């Protein structure tokens, strides 16, 4: 398998070996967003500030323990929403800030996200309709 964006990630996660290819791909997206946020909001020059580093590690931990494993969707579409409230707030702020900017930096990724969200919404509408028919 080809690995893209190799230059982008400098292995912030200490236990990278425990992650699957998809998990690493997901996390590199998150990392990208946190980096962007941290650079602009916290004016970090290299890497992440302590707070953002903590957030990123937390996200990595949650991802690793996610019961959906590699079948998981983006966390914003996830039903479980396993983040604890303080971290949820933080990641939400990051997504809110970096989400729209990601379109500029990484449009392919955003398209994939939108496509998946639409697909899921359609699927949940369908299942709701089925329930209503009963
Ligand atoms: Zn920061």
Image: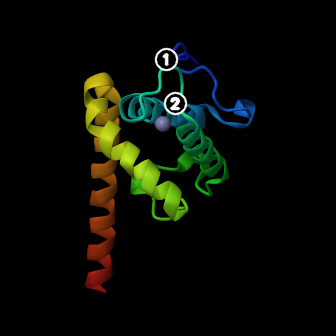
Q: Position of residue 44 (x, y in %)?
A: 47, 27
Residue 42 or residue 26, whichever sits in front: 42
Q: Residue at x 54, y 59 (%)?
A: 83
Q: Residue at x 33, y 65 (%)?
A: 124
Tell whether 17 sits left or right of 64: right
Q: Quadrant of the N terminus?
A: top right
Instruction: Report the residue marked by disc 2.
Output: 28
The reply to whether dot 1 and dot 2 touch (C-beta < 8 Å) is: yes
Tell whether 15 sits left or right of 87: right
Quarter residue 57 falls in: top right
Residue 42 or residue 116, whichever sits in front: 42
Q: Residue at x 73, y 37 (%)?
A: 18
Residue 129 lies, with reference to residue 14, above or below; the image says below
Q: Position of residue 80 (x, y in %)?
A: 51, 64
Q: Is disc 2 placed on a helix, strand or loop?
A: helix
Image disc number at residue 5: 1
Q: Residue at x 65, y 35 (%)?
A: 20
């Amino acid at each position: 398998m080809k690995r893209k964006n190799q230059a982008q990630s400098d292995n912030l996660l200490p236990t990278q070996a425990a992650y699957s290819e998809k998990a690493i791909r997901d996390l590199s997206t998150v990392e990208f967003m946190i980096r962007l946020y941290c650079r602009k909001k916290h004016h970090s020059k290299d890497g992440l500030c302590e707070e953002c580093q903590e957030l990123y590690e937390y996200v990595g931990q949650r991802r690793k323990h996610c019961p959906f494993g590699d079948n998981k969707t983006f966390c914003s579409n996830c039903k479980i929403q396993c983040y604890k409230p303080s971290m949820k707030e933080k990641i939400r702020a990051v997504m809110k800030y970096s989400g729209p900017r990601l379109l500029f930096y990484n449009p392919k990724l955003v398209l994939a996200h939108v496509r998946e969200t639409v697909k899921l919404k359609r699927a949940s509408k369908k299942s709701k309709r089925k329930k209503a028919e009963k």
